[in-house]
Image (cartoon, rainbow, N blue to C red):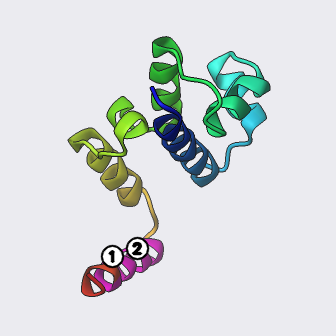
Amino acid sequence: MDGANLEEIGKRISERRKLMRLTQEQLAEQMEVSIQMISNLERGMKAIRIDNLIRASQILGVSTDYILTGQQTDHDINSLAEQISLLKEDRRKIVEMLVTFCLQEQ
C-alpha cells in the first residue's frame, strides 16, 4: 500500500475510535496490541495486518471494507440503524433532523 492509502486508513480508524470515545490505549488493549502500533496505524506509518484489521473492525463496529476503502457496506448501514434505534425518542428525533438537514444541503 502506498503512503496516501495508509494515511486514509489511519484517518478512518482514528475518526471511528474517537467517535466511539475510545482512547488509543483502550483500543490497543482491546486489540491486544501496543499503543505505539495504534499510533503508527493512525498516522499512516504502518500497514495493518489482516488479523488486526478484522479485530479493529469488530471493535469499531465497521466493516473491513470501510476501514480499507472508506466505502460503507450494508453491514455498516445496518449497524448505524441499530445504534439509532437504541436512542431515546428525543435523541432519535435530533438524528432525524440532522439527516434531513444534511440531505437538503446536497
Name the residue that disc number 2 marks. Answer: 95
Residue 62, position as x, y percentages in the image: 41, 39
- Which image quarter: residue 87? bottom left
Q: Position of residue 28 (x, y in %)?
A: 70, 26
Residue 92, magenta (yes or no): yes
Judge the density around disc 1: few (<14), some (14-19), many (≥20) Cα neighbours within 10 Å: few
Q: Is residue 64 above or below residue 84?
A: above
| Figure quadrant of the C terminus | bottom left
Which residue appears farthest toward the left when viewing the image?
74
Verify whether residue 72 appears in magenta.
no
Q: Which label lies toward us, 1 or 2?
A: 1
Q: Alpha carbon of mark 1 to alpha carbon of mark 2: how far? A: 6 Å
Tell me whether circle 1 and circle 2 mark residues in contact (CB < 8 Å): yes
Kindly identify the residue that appears in the image at 53 percent across and 35 percent down. 3
Residue 79 left/right relative to 38? left
The disc placed on residue 99 is 1
Secondary structure type for disc 1? helix
Q: How many marks?
A: 2
Q: What amino acid is labelled 1 in the image?
A: Val
